[in-house]
Amino acid sequence: MLGMRNLDLELIRAFVAAADHRSMTVAGNALHLTQSAVSQQIMRLERRLGQALFLRERRGLKLTAAGDRLLAKARRLIGLNDEIWAEMTTGFAGAVRLGVPYDLVGISLAPILKGFAEASPLVEISLVCASSPQLLEALGKGEVDLALVEEPLAAAGGECLGIERLVWVGAKAGTAHLKQPLPLSLVADTCAFRPAVTEALDAQGRGWRSVFENGNIDATTATVRTDLAVTAWLACTVPPDLDILGSEEGLPELPPFAITLHLSRSQPSEAARELARYLRAGWLRPRQAA
């Protein structure tokens, strides 16, 4: 029909990647495309819509008013497309090794993996839990097939599934945040949050000491619940029985982090690509209701 108009999902994906990363080059890396290819896709989309979506500034890309209006709907469009694909495509088989940071294994990831297992019963999933830097290293060595990674937003290099606040966390009505030096409990010395946390404290001139680092998130949580220390987690992972702390408690602001998806560059299997599609759809689903 002459009146029908269809959006090209590849152009929409390029737009969302560029909006997330504020850079054509970084978006190209995330999509395994060249900077030039992403730029051309954005220009094609702008021509089709008849509106500029980005302002090109020295510090990076900035959404125009039209681009800002499009972004949320573009995320929903991609999420719905990937959800339909995941639900309607069957017959995938094989083993897939998924790398995940400790704090994303529980509430955030469990329902997504449960849905994937029901949709693709012939795929055997193995979870590899480690810090984000360790997961990127494992991906490079071929020890995992794909990985969810937490990265500082300014330096994120994978496909961005979401952006979360990094926040201070303490016990309900606790006093650990008042102590000098600040008792700090992180899951591991390789934790992706550690550089951001220590740099913020150093910039504030606040002394700190490490209370617990052994790679066990349950033990880290216990030190916070018993008010022995504070920690830093993504806001979406903070348990309801703990408090989010901030400037009112005298703690410095922490930078936002991106949750990014990385696939092996050495021809990931169809089962791994299908799990990646399911992760995209599943991660976007709760955001739509938020």
Image (cartoon, grey):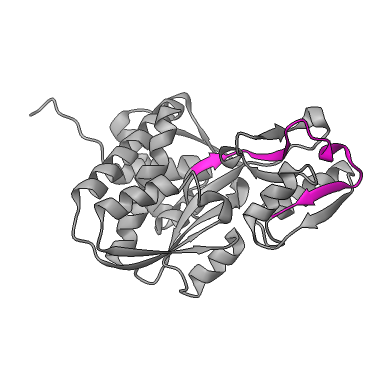
Q: Residue at x 19, y 55 (%)?
A: 90
Tell me which segment is drawn in magenta.
Answer: 162-186
* Residue 172 lies within the magenta run: yes
Asked whether the viewer can see residue 58, the reply is: no
Q: Where in the figure is residue 288, as x and y percent of width and height?
A: 40, 31
Left or right placement of residue 199 versus residue 136 in this view = right
Mark count: 0
**Residue, x 81% and y 56% (percent of image)?**
210
**Residue 2 vertical placement versus 96 (above, below):** above
**Does residue 177 appear left or right of residue 18 in this picture?**
right
Q: Residue at x 10, y 28 (%)?
A: 2
Q: Quadrant of residue 135?
A: bottom right
> Residue 140: x and y, percent?
50, 71
The extreme left residue here reads 1
Seen from the viewer's position, the closer of residues 114 and 201 is 114
**Foreground pick, 235 / 262:** 235
Residue 139 in the image: above or below residue 6 = below
Residue at x 64% of width, y 59% of height: 216
Which image quadrant for residue 47? Answer: top left
Q: Verify whether residue 122 appears in magenta.
A: no
